[in-house]
Structure formats: structure tokens, C-alpha cells
Amino acid sequence: MKPMHKLGTPVPTHKAYVVRNYKDVSLEQRARALKETEYNMFSFPADLLNLDYLSDSGSTSMTDLQWSALIHGDESYGRNKGYYVLLDAFRDVFERGDNPKKAINLVLSGEDDVEKLMKELYLTSFEGGFINGGVHQLARPNTFICPQGRAAEHLLFSTLAEVLFEIDPNKKYCIPNNGHFDTTGANIRAVNIEPVNLFDKSIVLNHFPHEDMDKRNPFKGDMDVEGLEKLIQTRGADSIPLILLTITNNSVAGQPVSMANIKAVHKVADKYGIPFFFDACRFAENAYFIKEFEEGYQDKSVRAIIQEMFSHVDGFTISLKKDGLANMGGLLAIRDKGVFSTKYSINGTQIGTRLKEKQIVTLGNDSYGALSGRDIMALAVGLHEVVKEPYLRSRITQTRYLAKKLAENNVPVVLPAGGHAVYIDMDRFLEGTGMKTEDFGGVGFSIELVKHYGIRSCELGPFAFEWDQRTEEQRKGILNLVRFAIPRNAYSLSDMDYTVAAVTELYKNKDQIPRVRISRGAELSLRHFQTGLVPEYK
């Protein structure tokens, strides 16, 4: 008899106790709303949709344990109790591997032994990792709570740029990545540093049989290590303030990064004395891919794999609105006395102190970093929920289901599927229509999908990444994709089936997809959040 995971259908992992009904919106009403919001996907009212794949950021349906923890939220301005359990949850997930302390249980269980609380939670000291504690977090701050990932990125890059200007105000810097996401690249450009993408577009778009998604994975999200070496030798190590690796690689179709690649990038960074950071938004999903497909990791736990992954970096930024299973939260963490801290603590000022001062004046006291006490408690529990293997199996299986069903209908999706989203290759999707890159066909597709079927997706291609304003070299790092980012714990397989039916119908009628013209704000940074558009039908 076949075991439960070999039946060819996902094993149930949760049930819903709250139902949110959708409104009955007509095609004419959606068309009117599209026109009056300038056909911008980020401006369309979410309440008029049936399914929303715009982003998986903050759109998570939280678990019952998270909702119950939320009641324990402490809104004290200085050192709320959630601050202590959140920092310890960070240590559990990113540093302790298979030996978590789960100090949060002291709060959730209503522990009232004051001496125990002081000894095990409030007055404990830690140093040497990403999450200093007690007096060490005061003397050498290295953990910076933020409202979301882009705030963590801004905190990091704006502070780093100030230090670099003190070192040499005339030097031109660049930061390599296996794929800068839109806001990451924008935060880097905002401080006059050049973001450089190092991946091979042909590898990403290589054919992969959908039947093999459960059997193997080529880790298409890996950084081009040879390209990294060439960049360092060409630009000079002193022109590269840090190396960034995005796990999983959102800009490159959500593809995972192998442990072998993490180690290889670390080796290069160590060779040249360059700090190595993660953009770690989907760290748990990436760890699950390593466990499932990389040799030597099948018998290791997700927690142990995460611990090994983070042992190779000097710091990381993360939006905890993804793999924190939270609706709000972010983090910047740097290794205590690590390469980054040592290199950029100059002129008598510790880099952590600079970061903390900026955090306080822009985001708030370090105890909360612009989060409510309720957010903090929900996040502290979410970090423990996201590393549970049944959850990760269910999450990634659902993404594969959507990708497989689309592929079976000959819709050109990037395969294998990543962990959080399915990406359609719009160059292949629009073959035979005469659509050019500058016609922004992916946006036209997204407009029609909302209008006819009440489904919102997100173009992450020539429009979002400003293809028309980039050099020929920069254009090589832009894929022509539309992303369907799946909210965590929110949708069912029937939702996936409806999506497949709608996208397939558009594919059959792709000659009706309009070209799109930018009517307002073509030169704005991050223009996909704010420009006006006009579809031009044949």
C-alpha cells in the first residue's frame, strides 16, 4: 500500500475556520475601476478581486497560534516583553539549528516566576552571533527590527553609503547580486551605488519537464561565481562594499540557491575580504529545496540547514512578511565582530551604533522598530511555524501544482517552479503576436486578467525593471516575466484550478492582449507602483 505522501495528491495540513466571501463584481465594473486607476495593478482596489497574486508579502493567513500570541502583545515603548522573545526567536531560527530554546513559551504559558523570567529571558546576555543580547546589544548593536524588508535595506544601504563617503568620496561602488529585486535595486541606486545582476538568463529559461519537478532541481537561482570573480577583478575589491545573495531568487523566477553556491560565494567573498550578505526573505523555502534536492541534505532538518546557510554570511536583510508568516515585520542583522562590522566601524564609531541611531530617528526605538507589540508577538510565533516541514511541503507542493497544471495546458511557465510563485515567460507566451519588448505585453496580460477574471498578477519584466531606461548591458539582466505570488495559507487547489482556466483562456486568445503605453511617470523610480498606463487595443 502506498504511503500518504505517495498518493499523487497533497496531504491536508490545515483547515479554515474563518471564511471571507468575495463580492460579485461584473466585468464592466472591473473595466471601469481599471480605467479610473490608470490601469496600474498596484492601484486597483483589492476588494474587487477574486484572487490576488500581486505579492506574497504580508498577505499571509496567520495560524491560530499566531492569533493567540497576538493577544499577548505588549505596547510598552521601551523593552516590551515581545522584544525579548522576538530576539530569541531569531536566535532559534538563524543560529541554534536543532536546539531551539523557544523562550516565547515563557510568555505564552503565563510564567509568573520572576526570577526564572529574569534568568531565562529578560536579563540574559548573548554575543558573537547576529543577535547580541543584554549589555552586548547596547555596546555593539547588531540587530535592527524594521517594519519590512525595504526599510531594512534602506537602513543598511543609506548608512553604508555614509561610511563609504567618509572612506573615499570619489570612488564608484557596485553591489553584485544573483538578482536584485526591484526595491533592493532602487535602494542601492538611491545612494549612488550600482546594483549588478549576476545570473545567466539562458539557464533560467532552459526547458525543464514539469514531470520532473518532484524528482530534481537544477538550482537556477545560483549566482554566477565566475562572473563574480570577473567583476571583482575588473572593478577592484575595494569598489565592492558587499556581496548580496537573494534566497530564493525572486527576480529570477523564484528559483532556489544551492548550499554549494552559498559556500562558493562565501569563498570568493572571504578571498577578497568582502562582506557577504543574504537577502533572506524566503530563507525557509530555500532551505526546503536544499533538503529535498541537494545531495547530502536529505537527512538533515530544515532548522539545521538554515543554521548552516546563515553560518556563511556576515549579515542579512529580510522581509518577515514572507518567511516570517507575518503581516508586518523586517530585520537587518550583522554578525558581531564580523567582516562587515570590523571593516566599516571607522573614525571611532561602531557601524552598529550608526545603524541604531538611524533606526531610532527613522523607524523608532530599537525595542519595536515601527512594529506594534501585537505584530512582534505574531512574528515571534510565525518564525517557529515557518520552519515546520509539513507547512513547507504543503506550500511548495501548491506552487508546483499551479505550475504543472499551466504547463499541461502548454502555457509557457518557468520550470521548475520556485517556492512562492509561478512565473510566466511572456516572450514565449506572446510569440506570434508581433508584440515587442517596449510594448509591455506582460502588463497588457495583467490588465486583461483582472478585467475578465478578477485575478491580479504582477509584471516583473521590462516595465517594472525600466528596460527602456537601462543600458544594453543592464538589459541582459532583465527577464520578461509575469509573477503569480501565492499568499501563504490562504488559497485552495480550487483557486489554483480557476487560475489555470483563466490564464489558459487568455493564452488561447493572446492576440487580443493590448500593447501598453505609459501615459504618466515613465521616468519615475519604481514606476510600476505609481505610473499611469493606457492599453492600446488593435
Image (cartoon, grey):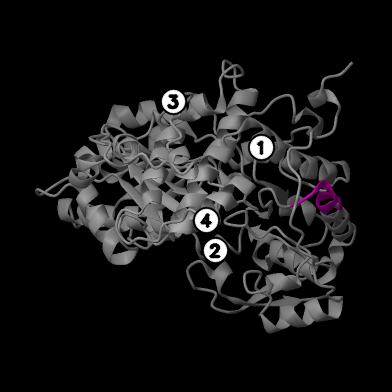
Instruction: Give the residue drawn at x 37%, y 52%.
Output: 145
State if disc 4 and disc 3 touch (CB < 8 Å): no
Q: Which residue is mark 2?
A: 466
Work out how far the residue at label 1 is from the one at label 4, CA to CA, in angstroms: 24 Å
Q: Which residue is mark 4?
A: 71
Q: Which residue is mark 3?
A: 263
Q: Earlier in the sequence, mark 1 or mark 4?
A: 4
Q: Earlier in the sequence, mark 1 or mark 3?
A: 3
Q: Nearer the viewer, mark 1 or mark 2?
A: 1
Work out how far the residue at label 3 is from the one at label 4, CA to CA, in angstroms: 41 Å
Q: Earlier in the sequence, mark 2 or mark 4?
A: 4
Badge 1: few (under 14), some or many (20 or more) residues near its Cα, within 10 Å? some
Q: Secondary structure at mark 1?
A: helix
Instruction: Give the residue drawn at x 69%, y 48%.
Output: 489
> What segment carries the magenta color?
491-497
At label 3, the amino acid type is Lys
Viewport quadrant of the C terminus: bottom right
Badge 3: few (under 14), some or many (20 or more) residues near its Cα, within 10 Å? some
In the image, residue 184 sits, relative to residue 511, either above or below, namely above
Residue 413, given in percent of the width and then of the height, sits at 75, 45
At label 2, the amino acid type is Glu
Q: Which residue is mark 1?
A: 391
Query: Does residue 229 show up magenta in the picture?
Result: no
Q: Is residue 452 left or right of residue 361?
A: right
